[in-house]
Image (spheres, rainbow, N blue to C red):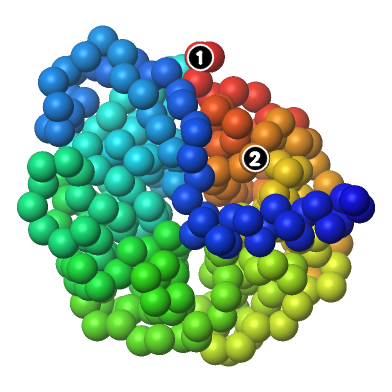
Amino acid sequence: MSRQRSILLAVAGLFAVGLVVVGVFLAVRTGPGSGDAGGPAAAAQEMEHIHGIGVDPGDGTVYAGTHYGLFRIADGAATRVSEVQDYMGFTVAGPGHFLASGHPGEGQDGPSSVGLIESTDGGETWETLSLSGEADFHALEFRHDRVYGLNSMTGQLLTSSDKQSWEELSQAEVADFAVSPEGPDELVATTEQGLTRSADGGATFEIVESAPVMVFVSWADDGALAGVTPDGVVYTALEPDGEWTEGASLGGQPEALTIASGTQIYAAANGAVLASGDGGATFSPLLGQ
């Protein structure tokens, strides 16, 4: 079997399971003020199923949205800052300001999907904003004072300027997407066929011939792009339809990816949270594993 066909089959498999990554276990340390409202405090816990990584622009702290809560990663350890619930989508909207989606934790009231939720205190407390019971966003972006979300329940790519009322952009079959820092109408999205690009706000997409088949894609404020293939190889570019440069392998199936700048990239794969300070050429574990 050719490598290209293997990649296509891997992407198809990820679509079939709704991009829910399973089997990722990371040992982490819990400290005081961990926000462990969903269960008793413990000396050690598990951060399982990483669905999103974000960087707080206020202090550069890295956060990971997981199956069992939101974790702050610092000083070689991870601390849960939220109550225990499933963060399927997670993005940073500003200093201490986060948006997320997913499912309530065990014993919590409400619908099986939380819709769009918001925290303005670094993830410790959350407020439901809209689409409770109607949306489970597996990918979220906040840019140009707008929220963009991929609703796994309906397949819709949606956007909102007030976090309350939503407009459908398209129902294109995408796995992940990113919004250009230059304007709200330019997006890129990963699909089974390859990376696609939209110039009309996500209404239509065209294949980017120069890019490899990727699962996750991210677009930094400085214009740099990063993507990762189903087998964990990171690629970077300065333009969506420009040259994509092959970087390091993450060493396993990727779970999440975000690019903070042309030099700083964060990823999760194969049971490790990784960071690159050289634009994806090399990655090192962010946690003391």
Viewer-closest of 6 and 25 = 6
Q: Earlier in the sequence, mark 2 or mark 1?
A: 2
What's the residue type where badge 2 is placed? Gln
Q: Mark 2 to mark 1: distance in Å?
A: 20 Å
Q: Is residue 277 left or right of residue 161?
A: right
Q: Which residue is mark 1?
A: 288
Identity of the residue furthest to the top in this view? 43
Q: Is residue 160 left or right of residue 17?
A: left
Viewer-closest of 31 and 192 = 192
What's the residue type where badge 1 is placed? Gly
- Give the residue at x 57% y 75%: 173
Q: Which residue is mark 2?
A: 253
The percent position of residue 224, horizontal first and vertical second, equals 67, 57
Viewer-closest of 132 and 283 = 132
**Which structural element holds mark 1?**
loop
Q: Residues within 10 Å of mark 1 (few under 14, many from 20)?
A: few
- Give the residue at x 15% y 45%: 125
Displayed quadrant of residue 61: top left
Identity of the residue furthest to the right in this view? 2
Q: Which mark is residue 57?
A: none
Answer yes or no: is residue 24 visible: yes
**Which structural element holds mark 2?**
loop
Q: Is residue 199 above or below residue 235?
A: below
Cβ–Cβ under 8 Å for marks 2 and 1: no
| Nearest to viewer (mark 2 / mark 1) | 2
Q: Is residue 76 above or below residue 24?
A: above
Answer yes or no: is residue 95 visible: no
Q: Is residue 60 left or right of residue 229?
A: left
